Amino acid sequence: MKGTMMQFPLTLTPLFERAGKLFPNVEIVSRRPDNSTHRYTYDDMYHRARALADTLQQSGVRPGDRVAALMWNHSAHLEVYFAVPIIGGVLHTLNLRLHPDELAFIINHAEDHVLIVDDVLLPVFEKLKDRVKFQRVIVVPFSGNPVPNGYEDYEMLLGQSNATPKYVELHEDDAAGMCYTSGTTGKPKGVVYSHRAIVLHSYSISLPDNFGISRTDTVLPAMSMFHANAWGLPYAAVMNGAKIVLPGPNLQPELILDLLSAEQVTLTGAVPTVWLGVLQCLEREPKRWSLPKGMRIIIAGSAAPETLFRRFDKFGVRMIHAWGMTETAPIGTVCTLGPEMQSCSEDARYELRTRQGVPSPFVEIRAIGDSGEVPWDGQAPGELELRGPFIAGSYYNLPEEGHKWSTDGWFRTGDVVTIDPAGYVKITDRTKDLIKSGGEWISSVDVENALVAHPAVAEAAVVAVPHPKWQERPLALIVLKNGTTVSSEELRTFLVSRFAKWQLPDDFVYLPELPHTSTGKLLKSELRQRYKTWSWQSEKSEL
Ligand code: AMP
């Protein structure tokens, strides 16, 4: 039909150009490894990103070429976030916590051409450099020390550049970035983000019933910029012209609180483990930090226990639960309450807030049970499947993983959920973490969340362990808060009002710490392996 709108591709270039023009004086603050602060403006970021884009182009980076980054959260990483995609390159963010073997595998699988690496991370690179082939390795002098001999100096290259990259004509489906899943089992799998996906995701998380990002915000991404685009926060913050605070490598709870308070951050986010630590500091010294009233904390990555919402509320801080995956760009659902829910009882509102929320616009969801799609009744469990413009359509160069998509094209998440009539998703488990006891399912997540509400418990994991009578029974692994004790009997009594007797862990094991993945999730596969021959003290478990 004639007389319709222009064909204008959704790419990062106009978003970046607009931010450079409209928000030149907005600040970007980074914390260096020695905890000193670096400040500059969008104008600086804009010109330096253009200079980097020009340098990369001059050195032969062509559309579609992969440029890898091994970097902490700081301003140069933000420059790389834009410099690579605006010349058609594909930014491959590397998870600096992975084992060198795994990193080498990922770099080779993605066929990365160039590496940009923080000087403080050179020891990570040096462990694998003989196994990978980069055409160039550019080192960012993040520590303030001179770049070691034999490496190219990021600052020197930017200084020599004339900062006039040639913008190539991009299509919105062209690749802009890629990230490998930090799966707890199996080979890492590459997810490629198109320009269109990143642009639409930035719009999506900016919406008021999502994270609600505006130019009046100060945004601190406390999740890693190497993992799933730091949940899209850097791109969305730049799109909106929000002040950005980047915490560098030191993520101890006190240091996060120092930054939140000094820069008066209004929106931040990280996995539950980070917020548990921050909360303990706040509760220990409630007067030490002054957080802006109504500050929003996005919590995602694993299930957020109810106790966190209640305890943060006491400090006037609003915690918002979200769910996502590397494959979903990553935010798929967000939990903000509708007006009709404001009149629910306080307990009901807290229960609602612990759900993973409703799908973002354009994200379609369904849950598939044993006999097909389950009703949205808040009861029937099924595996969550989704589709939408920022959901991966396949993995990079891994046709054997095609089974992760249904025959009609939906992405299978591996998360077991219920969906209520209002569309609120509640995750009960990963398919592989569910515990099947005597034919009945037990949600490890529900039991863990109840356990961390006990004042003596710092962290808890509940895993399935083979049992001679019931096939599997739940074993609880507990980390206590410093200086506290609690017996297994007390913990069982604490849980008893919330669960059927057969759902309670049979045994409790106390550990100094629990294993985590490189992105802070409980590494339950390792715990299952460690305890698979556990000899039950209570073989008499009754169903
Ligand atoms: P990743 O791709 O490493 O970001 O991991 C994605 C997985 O993290 C999801 O499939 C979920 O199992 C888990 N996850 C993410 N957010 C949440 C959440 N809010 N509650 C429970 N699990 C979550």
Image: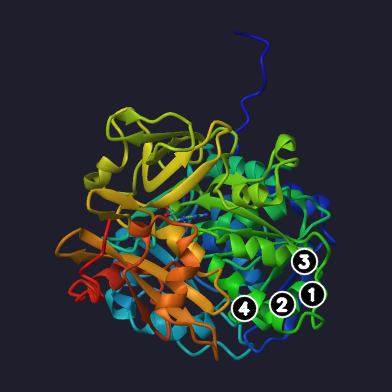
Crowd class of label 2 (few under 14; some 14 to 19; many from 20; radius 10 Å) = many
Per the image, the residue denoted by label 3 is 265
Label located before the other in sequence (4 or 3) = 4
Image location (x, y in percent) of residue 93? 47, 63
- Residue type, numbered disc 3: Val
Give the amino acid at mark 2. Leu
Q: Secondary structure at mark 4?
A: helix
Distance from the alpha carbon under mark 3 to that under mark 1? 7 Å
Q: Position of residue 405 (x, y in %)?
A: 32, 38
CB-based contact (under 8 Å), mark 1 and mark 2: yes
Is disc 1 placed on a helix, strand or loop?
A: helix
Q: Residues within 10 Å of mark 3 (few under 14, many from 20)?
A: many
What residue did someone put label 1 on? 261
* Residue 270 image-quadrant placement: bottom right
Q: Residue at 50% x, 63% y: name it.
A: 449
Query: Mark 1 or 4 closer to N-term?
Result: 4
Question: From mark 1 to mark 2, how far is it between C-alphas?
Answer: 6 Å
Quadrant in which residue 245 is drawn: bottom right
